[in-house]
Image: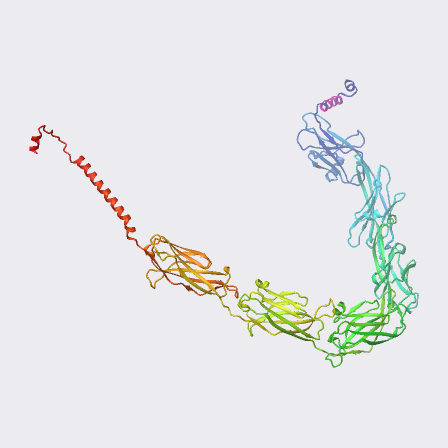
């Protein structure tokens, strides 16, 4: 360190020594910094140089001064200061005063020197200085950077593009950007477009300054697909190709050249820019140049089997770059389409198997049909859709296509002449019924067939009309059904069910012979029958087309009418004489002219002749039983309806009640079937005679008796009296019978005033009345018909007449409800409570004697005690020994 100090001047050595010691000791020092140089700028452009200070002491806001030197270590020229307005050199005073040179404070410790219009004379070294506010001198207080101002030599010379370009064509944008290379600067070029409608400028692509490419947001995909290509040229010429343009590429194009400087900090700085307009470009839509015509190579009038050839010619600008989709139509319906990739596809059911579509030359498409048929006649036209690819040639066909135009050609009318087949139709009866429900068969024969082409077939349609004078219009025919050329059955609306079930069949027995067959005829089947035969030929698509029809003469068919006869007889097979018994009725059916019918049965009833009719039960022809609305749901188990024979039905009603009394009968409907599996058809309906349920309710008879084993009791004994009931007649079940029993008491024999003693209701609840006696009462049911009254601890007041009353309740089998019978009263029974004199006095006498004896003994003892204790003289005089003297004195 000492050697180094000897070589350096003393001031520098001292500063280095202090700075080194401060760094080793971890103490920071002031640092003033400006951007690294040199800074290359273009004359006439604004320039800004920043300066900041860090790690300083003193106030937060620092002052700055700018000075410059023309050459390294040359004389300093003061530029501007933050604290001294008169700091500027006289040569710069006007520029500072006008604001051309200014210093803006960005932060307390950062400022920016600005020169709005830099000149070549401004080149030099710029030094940023900060006055010291530190307590100690540490670090650096100034920093400088070199500014190099070069002249503006940037030139942009664009070439005008083609003013009109067809859609799907290319636009070439050529722009020459140069400058004189005096310093290491770089160039970039940017193309843009200004839309005529929105007047907005959109960036297309930028190239440079390092050779990189940047695209605008709307052109990124096109650049990736190759739709926008950059072609760098020599001597500053740059070319941009926009391929396969669309109408959206209309607008005015411009070119911008930019000169850049690469700063020592590694950043790129734009130092000058120039924009020139290249010129407007109009993109002509394909629809303006697209034309097409349809023409016929073959004759316009053909016979079936001849070939048809039609040509569609397309003309459009840039034909090789346009994808064409061509469709031939017949009578407005698509036939066949060739897609833009050359693939031919059909169009649904209109596709012709023998039709072809091919490209015979650029822009020419031929439709060919090897053999036409009648349905091929009509107006033909071709439709062309033009597609433009939004992708470049380098994209390998991976661009996006969009439809740019669609046009329809004029029509070409093609006629096809057809010779219709001819034939004769005859109708013959094969089997004619004599009665209703017999089968019927009619044959339709076709003869003398001519001009039916190979593969042709015959179809038939059967018609039915009423006979003249039958009430209906014989001219109004009703379609039965038809068979087309493929043998498909098409039923008429009226006969649809019978055809589907097989009751009526349509048969093709020969190619020229047809049969109409009825399995079982109905009266409505009488009438006039005709068959309409149609000729069908094969069309170009392999289907059948009707070409001619011929109808047979009408064939009348009639037979004798015999109306069905239906009779029903009802009879009682088991009568209901009393309530709760069973009623049974049978209904026998007698038929004529019905064949093998099925029957539905309705069991109906009336309470009286004028009462409303109620439906009890029903039985369908398929033996399905249902209960009517008048049936009590709780009694459905007591109702039975069944088929007991081929034409006999039984109805049973159990546990007959009074509400069941009335008239009962059967309502029978006969149904017939044409064949198995077919639905039932109603044929006839009738009602049977009426049978009656009529009985009187005879309830049970009751009797009552009162008895007792002992009618005389002594006091405190228990008296027992039994009220016995009996029942006769239609005795109900034990669970269906209960009683209400009441007991009455009369004190005098034959008295009229009876007092209720106790009672028990029919639910077994006992109730005792208040009595003027100390005895107790209880009622006990000893069996179903016996109730016993017990008087416990009888007293003399319990003597008197007793009788019982009873009200029977029984469950009526006819009504199913509890019924109250008449009130029953028993005979009277007199109960005597005897009074025994000795038995009643012996105890009182005994108690009295014992009490008297006790009282006497107590009195004697008490008297002795009193005499001894209370009546003796307390002053005792001694008696003289001379007894005689004492005696005398006494």
- Residue 118 shows in this picture: yes
Rendered image quadrant of residue 459: bottom right
Q: Residue visible at 44% across and 63% down? A: 807
Residue 417 coordinates in the image, percent (x, y): 89, 71
Residue range of the region highlighted in magenta in the rendering: 12-23
Q: Is residue 807 left or right of residue 269?
A: left
Rendered image quadrant of residue 406: bottom right
- Residue 326 shows in this picture: no
Residue 27 coordinates in the image, percent (x, y): 70, 25
Number of on-image labels: 0
Rendered image quadrant of residue 35: top right
Q: Residue visible at 67% across and 66% down? A: 623
Compare residues 838 and 465 and report the one nearer the observer.
Answer: 838
In magenta stretch: residue 808 = no
Q: Is residue 839 left or right of residue 479?
A: left
Compare residues 751 and 592 and report the one nearer the observer.
Answer: 751
Q: Which colour scheme is used?
A: rainbow
Q: Quadrant location of the C terminus?
A: top left
Residue 206 coordinates in the image, percent (x, y): 82, 45
Question: Does residue 729 lie above or below 18 as drawn?
Answer: below
Q: Is residue 883 left or right of residue 108?
A: left
Residue 276 coordinates in the image, percent (x, y): 83, 48
- Magenta segment's dominant SS is helix
Residue furthest toward the bottom?
A: 469
Question: Does residue 849 lie above or below 266 as drawn?
Answer: below
Q: Quadrant location of the N terminus?
A: top right
Question: Does residue 351 lie above or below 36 as drawn?
Answer: below
């Amino acid at each position: 360190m000492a050697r180094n100090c000897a070589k350096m001047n003393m001031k520098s050595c001292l500063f280095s020594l202090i700075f080194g010691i401060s760094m080793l000791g971890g103490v920071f020092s002031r640092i003033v910094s400006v951007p690294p140089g040199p800074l290359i700028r273009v004359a006439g452009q604004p320039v800004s140089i920043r300066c900041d200070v860090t790690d300083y002491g003193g106030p937060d806001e620092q002052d700055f001064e700018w000075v410059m030197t023309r050459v390294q270590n040359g004389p300093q020229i003061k530029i501007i200061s933050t604290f001294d307005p008169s700091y500027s050199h006289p040569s710069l005073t006007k520029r500072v005063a006008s604001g051309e040179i200014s210093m803006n404070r960005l932060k307390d410790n950062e400022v920016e020197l600005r020169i709005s219009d830099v000149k070549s004379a401004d080149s030099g070294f710029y030094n940023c200085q900060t006055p010291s506010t530190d307590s100690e001198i540490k670090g650096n207080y100034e920093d400088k950077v070199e500014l190099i101002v070069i002249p503006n030599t940037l030139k942009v010379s664009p070439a005008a593009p083609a003013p009109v370009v067809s859609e799907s064509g290319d636009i070439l944008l050529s722009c020459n950007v140069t400058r004189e290379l005096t310093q290491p600067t770089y160039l970039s070029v940017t193309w843009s477009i200004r839309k005529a409608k929105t007047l907005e400028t959109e960036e297309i692509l930028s190239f440079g300054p390092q050779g990189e490419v940047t695209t605008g947001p709307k052109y990124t995909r096109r650049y990736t697909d190759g739709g926008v290509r950059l072609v760098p040229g020599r001597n500053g010429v740059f070319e941009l190709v926009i391929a396969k343009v669309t109408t959206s590429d209309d607008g005015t194009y411009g070119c911008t050249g930019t000169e850049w400087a690469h700063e020592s900090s590694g950043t790129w700085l734009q130092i000058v820019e120039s924009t020139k307009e290249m010129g407007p470009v109009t993109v002509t839509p394909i629809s303006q140049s697209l034309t097409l015509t349809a023409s016929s190579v073959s004759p316009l009038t053909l016979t079936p089997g001849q070939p048809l050839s039609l040509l569609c010619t397309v003309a459009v600008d840039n034909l090789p770059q346009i994808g064409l989709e061509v469709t031939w139509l017949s009578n407005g319906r698509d036939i066949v389409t060739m897609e833009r990739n050359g693939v031919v596809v059909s169009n649904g059911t209109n596709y012709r198997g023998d039709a072809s579509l091919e490209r015979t030359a650029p822009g020419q498409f031929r439709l060919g049909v090897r053999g036409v048929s009648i349905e091929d006649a009509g107006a033909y036209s071709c439709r062309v859709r033009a597609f433009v690819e939004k992708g470049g040639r380098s994209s390998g066909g991976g661009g996006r296509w969009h439809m740019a135009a669609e046009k329809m050609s004029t029509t070409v009318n093609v006629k096809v002449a057809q010779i219709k087949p001819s034939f004769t139709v005859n109708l013959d009866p094969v089997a004619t019924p004599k009665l209703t429900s017999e089968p019927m068969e009619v044959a339709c024969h076709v003869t003398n067939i001519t001009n039916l082409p190979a593969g042709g077939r015959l179809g038939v349609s059967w018609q039915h009309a009423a006979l003249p004078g039958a009430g209906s219009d014989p001219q109004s025919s009703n379609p039965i059904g038809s068979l087309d050329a493929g043998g498909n059955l098409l039923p008429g609306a009226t006969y649809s069910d019978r055809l589907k079930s097989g009751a009526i069949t349509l048969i093709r027995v020969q190619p020229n012979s047809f049969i109409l067959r009825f399995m079982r005829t109905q009266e409505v089947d009488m009438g006039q029958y005709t068959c309409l035969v149609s000729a069908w030929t094969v069309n170009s698509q392999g289907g059948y087309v009707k070409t001619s029809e011929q109808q047979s003469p009408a064939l009348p068919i009639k037979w004798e009418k015999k109306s069905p006869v239906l009779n029903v007889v009802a009879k009682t097979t088991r009568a209901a004489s009393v309530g709760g018994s069973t009623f049974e009725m049978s209904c026998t059916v007698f038929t004529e002219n019905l064949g093998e019918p099925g029957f539905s049965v309705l069991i109906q009833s009336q309470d009286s002749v004028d009462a409303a009719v109620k439906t009890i039960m029903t039985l369908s022809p398929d033996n399905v039983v249902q209960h009517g609305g008048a049936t009590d749901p709780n009694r459905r188990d007591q109702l039975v309806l069944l088929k007991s024979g081929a034409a006999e039905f039984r109805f049973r009603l159990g546990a007959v009640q009074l509400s069941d009394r009335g008239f009962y009968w059967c309502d029978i409907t006969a149904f017939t079937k044409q064949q198995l599996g077919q639905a039932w058809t109603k044929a006839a309906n009738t009602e049977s005679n009426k049978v009656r349920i009529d009985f009187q309710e005879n309830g049970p008879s009751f009797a009552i008796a009162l008895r007792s084993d002992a009618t005389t009791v002594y006091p405190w004994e228990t008296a027992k009296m039994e009220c016995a009931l009996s029942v006769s007649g239609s005795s109900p079940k034990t669970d269906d019978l209960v009683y209400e029993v009441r007991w009455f008491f009369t004190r005098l024999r034959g008295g009229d005033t009876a007092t209720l003693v106790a009672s028990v209701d029919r639910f077994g609840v006992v109730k005792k009345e208040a009595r003027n006696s100390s005895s107790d009462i209880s009622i006990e049911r000893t069996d179903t018909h016996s109730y016993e009254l017990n008087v416990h601890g009888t007293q003399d007041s319990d003597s008197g007449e007793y009788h019982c009353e009873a009200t029977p309740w029984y469950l009526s089998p006819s009504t199913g409800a509890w019924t109250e019978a008449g009130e029953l009263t028993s005979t009277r029974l007199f109960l005597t409570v005897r009074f025994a004199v000795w038995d009643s006095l012996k105890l009182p006498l005994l108690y009295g004697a014992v009490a008297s004896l006790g009282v006497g003994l107590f009195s004697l003892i008490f008297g002795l005690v009193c005499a001894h204790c209370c009546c003796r003289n307390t002053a005792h005089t001694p008696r003289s020994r001379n007894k005689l003297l004492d005696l005398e004195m006494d």
